[in-house]
Image (tube, coloured by chain):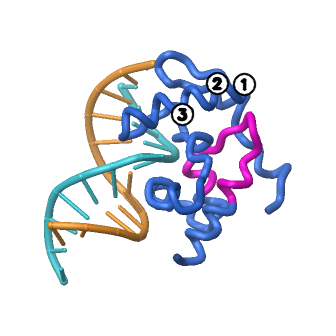
Chain colours: A blue, B cyan, C orange
Amino acid sequence: MNEFTQLVVEIIISIPEGKVATYGQIAKLAGSPRGARQVARILHTQTRKFNLPWYRVINSQGKIVIKDPYGADEQRAKLLSEGIEVSDSFIIDLKKYIWDCDTISI
DNA sequence: CTGGTGACTTATC
DNA sequence: AGATAAGCCACCA
């Protein structure tokens, strides 16, 4: 567990309900503007340990591109239950639901 | 050490 | 929206 990982975890669990954040955004906040892939990796590996709301983290296109089919379905269901619109193609309106992290300080 | 890979990103068409 | 290309970085065989 390094500092970056801990920071990413803190940020992810700080995402408010009804909002979503992108990998790149989180990576930037955690201090690694190029670390989007590492954020994804952390999500993949640390979710079980920290019970992370991984479903609130999406790619910059606002689209759910997840490896595990079960995950995408679960993610869409959870987001819909939080009031976030998700199309049949797993596309989210980022303009509306992106987490404006400037309004929140960790 | 080297090379392949991925729950990514930005740019371009 | 979909497809392609180049770039970045940690993990694994």
Left or right of A63? Residue A101 is: right
Q: Are the two marked residues, 1 and 3, in contact with CB atoms closer than 8 angstroms? A: no
Residue A5, percent from left and from top: 56, 69
For numbered disc 3, what is the local secondary structure? helix
- Please determine if labels 2 and 1 lie on a single subunit: yes
Spatial CA distance of label 1 from label 3 is 13 Å
Q: Which residue is mark 3?
A: A75
Q: Name the residue type under label 1.
A: Gly
**Residue that appears at 85% across and 49% down:** A103
Badge 2: residue crowd in 10 Å (few <14, some 14–19, many ≥20): some
Choose between A60 and A66: the one closer to the eye.
Answer: A66
Mark 1, chain letter?
A
Mark 3, chain letter?
A
Which of the two discs, 1 and 3, labels the residue nearer the N terminus? 3
**Residue that appears at 37% across and 39% down:** A68
Q: Are the two marked residues, 2 and 3, in contact with CB atoms closer than 8 angstroms? A: no
Q: Which residue is mark 1?
A: A83
Residue A38, percent from left and from top: 46, 61
Which of the two discs, 2 and 3, labels the residue nearer the N terminus? 3
Quarter holding the C terminus of chain A is bottom right
Mark 2, chain letter?
A
For numbered disc 1, what is the local secondary structure? loop
Residue A32, percent from left and from top: 56, 66
Badge 1: residue crowd in 10 Å (few <14, some 14–19, many ≥20): few
Q: Are the two marked residues, 2 and 1, in contact with CB atoms closer than 8 angstroms? A: yes
Residue A20 counted in the magenta span: yes
Q: Which residue is mark 2?
A: A80
Q: What segment is highlighted magenta in the picture?
A: A11-26
Q: Name the residue type under label 2.
A: Leu
For numbered disc 2, what is the local secondary structure? helix
